[in-house]
Image: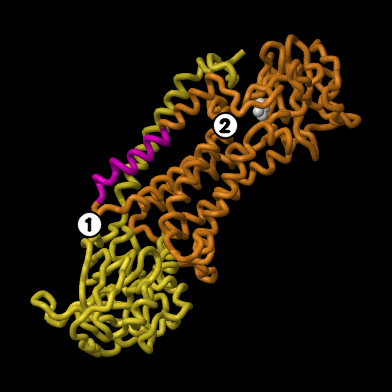
């Protein structure tokens, strides 16, 4: 939770997370650069820059694929949620790996000429009207710009400055970046490869991202019936103690209805941090706790406990014929609403 | 209440620790296995390599791109021609034009791949001695299929120094004056690497860039100077076979 900004708010989870991530990346690069060449069938080895381009480029692609899979995987199976917790560090590391790939290509292919290297980069290949030989570098540049932009704005300062909805839309740009990277590889390295393995692995990755998103995107819930403008949310006993349900609201974000100590409270489903799905969270120490990074809010007024300052919009609830009804018009953030006691 | 992970409380991960340990372990093994598989199927970049510091004396031919023609010897009964280039992605056309047809001493660094003998970082100095005009032997009209590469990367400065991922670099090199070579799919009179020029035997026109780095088919005449074949063609008429 944010009361002040630190470069990184380290804690034990983040250290473990980053340690595992670095170990995975380091082993990938080490195996690619120093072990795999012993198994190559080549007249002479690849030069160091070309080998580095391959190692860091493919690594960045796989990391990006993993980042995009974590979200839907966590929705399908809550045990993946801890992988989502520190996804920003994952993104920053992926950006660093991609920059290493780009730097090797830039130094090797576009330096040492009478042209400025950036001019050489943009003018080296202008065959825009053909598929084979298309300047795949432009897709790589776009993907890299997206990664750098997202890494640069990943800090909570930017989140607060841009507001969570804008920040989140910006960070959805990762999908455009991923598409650009796929095109970059498909029109570049795949065209030059004599072995289909990279094409096969890439296709599997793209399929995995697509299938996971489709599976996680299946939303069985449809807005319920309304009675005098109130939405029928269901029976109180359908909500487990300490947990919540998400109630769809036509034309708006869902509302999370929590049950704690035999009382019900309703707040927006969007966490004030990064719009995480609060209904997938839990009540801990008497507070709604977001599943993504653990931001907490009081049940009755949606306010983060002091010294934190985040506030959620709250909603009114009532019982009719044993059913919980939700008033879909939101109260201003932080408005106190007396929790509804379950009969 | 069932397990719930809170990021700032590492101990809350305990119920899921086994599952997460397995996921991380699998990810580590999968990443390493993919690195091993992808790293070991690298396309063969060929055998172009550094061939030593060079200090040679011969006659300069400036067109289509600078060549140094050496006198015949036991190994090269028809004489030997070396392609010349500057340091970096730049040619030595100005130096070569000034000394065209003259005897020079050329110093630089050698790279060799198959029949391409390339000298880079070349400095030319006028030299004393005979400067016989190199004979141009016509080898007829050919329809050839192959790839346009820059002679420098292809000769082993880069491995790989060809293909579509290297296309932009080849374009930067060739437009900087590095001699382009046509790497044929089948040898022409024993040569798989032909120096390129336009149909009149001059440097390639600027529009070569759409045709580099991939298989192209083109028609033209082939001539030989010493042991180097030169493909004179209208590169803009090249087609994808
Ligand atoms: S989105 Fe980060 S704590 Fe809720």
Q: Is residue B148 visible?
A: no
Identified at 22% across, 57% down, the residue is A43
Q: Nearer the viewer, residue A183 or B23?
A: A183
In three-dimensional space, the C-alpha distance between marks 1 and 2, rounded to whole angstroms, equals 48 Å
Residue at the spot of label 1: A43
Question: Tell me, what hue is chain A?
Answer: orange
Q: Quadrant of residue A313?
A: top right
- State which chain is coloured yellow: B
Please check whether the numbered discs 1 and 2 fall on a single chain: yes
Left or right of B221, for residue A81: right
Q: Is residue A28 above or below residue A143?
A: above
Residue at the spot of label 2: A76
Q: Among all residues in the image, which is located at the extreme front? A: B128
Q: Is residue A137 visible?
A: yes
Q: Which secondary structure lies at badge 1?
A: loop
Left or right of B177, for residue B159: left
Point out the tag, 1 or 2, that comes first from the N-terminus. Answer: 1
Q: Nearer the viewer, residue A205 or B35?
A: B35
Q: Chain of mark 1?
A: A
Identified at 27% across, 78% down, the residue is B126
- Pinpoint residue A36: horizontal percent, then vertical percent: 29, 44
């Amino acid at each position: 939770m944010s009361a002040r900004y630190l470069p990184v708010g380290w804690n034990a989870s983040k250290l473990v997370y980053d340690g595992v991530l670095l170990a995975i990346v380091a082993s990938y690069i080490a195996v690619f650069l120093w072990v795999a060449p012993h198994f190559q069938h080549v007249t002479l080895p690849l030069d160091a820059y070309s080998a580095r381009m391959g190692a860091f480029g493919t690594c960045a692609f796989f990391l990006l694929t993993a980042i995009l899979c974590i979200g839907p995987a966590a929705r399908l199976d809550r045990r993946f949620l801890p992988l989502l917790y520190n996804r920003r560090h994952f993104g920053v590391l992926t950006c660093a790996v991609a920059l290493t790939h780009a730097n090797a290509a830039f130094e090797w292919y576009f330096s040492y000429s009478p042209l400025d290297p950036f001019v050489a980069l943009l003018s080296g290949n202008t065959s825009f009207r053909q598929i084979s030989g298309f300047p795949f570098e432009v897709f790589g540049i776009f993907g890299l710009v997206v990664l750098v932009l997202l890494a640069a704005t990943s800090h909570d300062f930017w989140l607060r400055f841009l507001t969570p909805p804008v920040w989140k839309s910006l960070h959805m740009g990762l999908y455009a970046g991923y598409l650009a990277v796929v095109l970059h590889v498909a029109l570049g390295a795949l065209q030059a490869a004599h072995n289909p393995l990279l094409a096969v692995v890439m296709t599997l990755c793209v399929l995995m991202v697509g299938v996971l998103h489709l599976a996680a995107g299946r939303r069985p819930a449809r807005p319920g019936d309304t009675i005098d403008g109130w939405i029928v949310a269901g029976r109180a006993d359908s909500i487990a103690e300490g947990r919540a349900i998400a109630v769809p609201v036509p034309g708006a974000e869902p509302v999370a209805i929590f049950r704690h100590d035999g009382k019900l409270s309703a707040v927006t489903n969007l966490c004030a941090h990064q719009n995480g799905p609060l209904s997938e969270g839990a009540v801990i120490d008497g507070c709604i706790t977001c599943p993504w990074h653990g931001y907490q809010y009081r049940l009755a007024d949606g306010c983060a406990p002091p010294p934190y300052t985040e506030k959620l919009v709250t909603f009114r609830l009532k019982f009719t014929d044993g059913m919980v009804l939700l008033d879909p018009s939101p109260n201003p953030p932080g408005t106190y609403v007396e929790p509804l006691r379950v009969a | 209440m069932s397990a719930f992970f809170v990021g700032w409380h590492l101990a809350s991960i305990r119920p899921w620790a086994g599952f997460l340990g397995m996921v991380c372990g699998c990810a580590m093994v999968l990443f390493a296995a993919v690195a091993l598989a992808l790293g070991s199927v690298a396309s063969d970049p060929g055998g172009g390599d550094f061939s030593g510091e060079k200090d040679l004396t011969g006659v300069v031919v400036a067109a289509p791109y600078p060549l140094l023609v050496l006198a015949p010897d036991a190994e090269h009964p028809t004489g030997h021609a070396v392609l010349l280039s500057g340091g970096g992605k730049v040619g030595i056309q100005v130096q070569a034009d000034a000394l065209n047809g003259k005897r020079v001493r050329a110093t630089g660094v050698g790279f060799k791949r198959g029949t391409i003998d390339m000298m880079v970082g070349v400095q030319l100095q006028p030299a004393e001695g005979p400067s016989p005009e190199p004979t141009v032997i016509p080898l007829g009209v050919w329809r050839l299929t192959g790839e346009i590469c820059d002679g420098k990367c292809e000769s082993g400065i880069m491995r790989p120094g060809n293909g579509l991922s290297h296309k932009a670099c080849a374009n930067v090199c060739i437009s900087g004056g590095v001699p382009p070579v046509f790497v044929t799919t089948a040898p022409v009179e024993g040569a798989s690497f032909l120096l390129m020029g336009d149909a009149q035997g001059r440097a390639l026109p600027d529009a070569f860039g759409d045709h580099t780095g991939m298989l192209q088919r083109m028609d033209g005449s082939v001539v030989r100077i010493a042991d180097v074949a030169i493909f004179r063609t209208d590169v803009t008429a090249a087609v994808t076979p």
